[in-house]
Amino acid sequence: MSGLFSMFFGNNDAKKDTPKKAIADLRMQITLLQKKEDYLTKQIEEQENLARKNVTTNKNLARTALRRKKMHEKNLEGLQGQIDSLESQLNAIESANLNFETMKAMKQGSKALKHIHGNMNIDKVDQTMDEIEEQVTLGQEINNAISRPLAGLEMDDDELNDELENLEQEVLEEKMVVGAGRAPVAIPGGVSSSTTNIPATKNAATPAKKEEEDSDEEEELRRLQAEMAL
């Protein structure tokens, strides 16, 4: 066993391929012995058949055939023992080689982990996580501060609602006033009835100018009526 470990874990670079070569040689030898095994099995069958064929007619030949059969059986038994030994050794080497390759891979993985974790430890990780949490908290506080209304710009919702209701009431009253003051009916001569009751003064406008003003007023009233209809 110590020789097996020295074969795998020795410092000599020439020994690196020793397991592979040993495995290849063992497999080759096992194959050769198995072929010999097949040959002996056939010889045993042939000698047995020869003995059966001549057991009643030629006993000497039958006896010789049985003797050869026994010899082949003895050789076959020894050959099978060799094959069993070689297969056991092959399995041991393959298992040891697999363990060696596994251990080598694990060692390389360990080196990689050490390299990765070379500048890391639990204290540094905790410190980094604390710094990240601190910055996230700071960012949230900054965002809240930026989003907060400036001093003097705060608005009371109740006050806004009251102002909105007052504005709505004013608009409704204006609509009622405009609806009550529709354009007056014109009388003959192109002068509206609204102008008949206005006394003449020294600075009164001429009839042509008054008609133009009335026409503008009527047009403005129509425009307002159209807007209110919308």
Image (cartoon, rainbow, N blue to C red):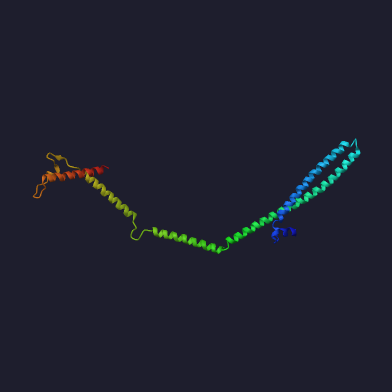
Provide residue 43's location: percent of width, then percent of height: 82, 42
In which quadrant will I find the N terminus?
Answer: bottom right
Q: Residue at x 14, y 42 (%)?
A: 193
Q: Residue furthest top?
A: 57
Task: Pick the residue in front: 218 or 44.
Answer: 44
For residue 24, above or below residue 123: above
Q: Can residue 101 be spotted in the picture?
A: yes
Total numbered badges shown on the rendered structure: 0
Q: Residue at x 53, y 62 (%)?
A: 126
Q: Is residue 17 left or right of residue 164?
A: right
Q: Residue at x 76, y 51 (%)?
A: 86
Q: Residue furthest front?
A: 14
Task: Pick the residue in front: 163 or 204.
Answer: 204
Q: Is residue 129 left or right of residue 5?
A: left
Q: Is residue 176 left or right of residue 71?
A: left
Provide residue 164's location: percent of width, then percent of height: 30, 51
For residue 117, above or below residue 37: below
For residue 40, above or below residue 101: above
